[in-house]
Image (spheres, rainbow, N blue to C red):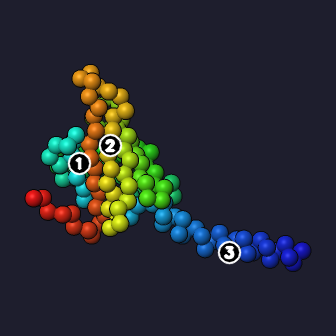
């Protein structure tokens, strides 16, 4: 009985020690992230990403000057890959996949999985810089 109780205690303590690291790894830093969105290689637009966290995970709100805020859907962070959907004013959402860079920022693309009427694939390059990090100056 003592051996079983000791094993349960050891298991619980190891889970407690592992939880904070796992939670930290799978959530974004809360706060105002700076960023850019460059539609299909066009001039990038400066944007803000407001990140909040709760028991369910991270939530992202996109803020663009003179436009209503947009909530990103299905936000998931697994190791260094961040994924979410973005309803960019159209009927279909864009699917976004960004990867963590060595400095803590994220870069990637948001893509429309369906080819449009023009026969072109619609995509945008996306960058997110964490709170406190200054984005590079535009040339």
Residue appearing at x 51%, y 58% in the figure: 55
> If the image is split into quadrants, where does the C terminus sit?
bottom left
Residue appearing at x 41%, y 53% in the figure: 82
Label 3: how many residues lie within 10 Å, few (<14), some (14-19) or many (20+)? few
The residue that label 1 is drawn on is 37
SS class, disc 3: helix
Residue 54 visible, this orientation: no
- Res. 50 image quadrant: bottom left
Q: Earlier in the sequence, mark 2 or mark 3?
A: 3
The residues tagged by marks 2 and 3 sit, at their Cα atoms, a distance apart of 41 Å
Residue appearing at x 48%, y 66% in the figure: 24
The residues tagged by marks 3 and 1 sit, at their Cα atoms, a distance apart of 44 Å
Q: Nearer the viewer, mark 3 or mark 1?
A: 1
Label 1: how many residues lie within 10 Å, few (<14), some (14-19) or many (20+)? many
SS class, disc 2: strand
Q: Earlier in the sequence, mark 3 or mark 1?
A: 3
Q: Is residue 84 above or below residue 32?
A: above
Front-most of 82 and 74? 82
Q: Is residue 124 above or below residue 78?
A: above
Residue appearing at x 70%, y 71% in the figure: 12
Q: Residue 5 in the image: x percent, y percent? A: 82, 74
**Residue 110, label in figure:** 2
SS class, disc 1: strand
The residue that label 3 is drawn on is 13
């Amino acid at each position: 009985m003592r051996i079983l109780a000791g094993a349960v205690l050891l298991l619980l303590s190891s889970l407690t020690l592992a939880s904070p690291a796992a939670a930290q790894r799978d959530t974004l830093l809360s706060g105002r992230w700076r960023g850019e969105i460059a539609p299909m290689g066009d001039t990038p637009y400066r944007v803000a990403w407001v990140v909040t966290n709760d028991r369910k995970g991270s939530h992202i709100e996109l803020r663009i000057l003179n436009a209503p805020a947009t909530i990103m859907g299905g936000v998931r962070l697994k190791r260094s890959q961040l994924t979410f959907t973005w309803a960019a004013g159209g009927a279909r959402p864009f699917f976004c996949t960004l990867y963590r860079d060595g400095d803590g920022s994220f870069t990637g693309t948001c893509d429309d999985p369906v080819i449009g009427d023009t026969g072109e694939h619609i995509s945008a390059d996306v960058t997110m810089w964490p709170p406190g990090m200054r984005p590079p100056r535009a040339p």
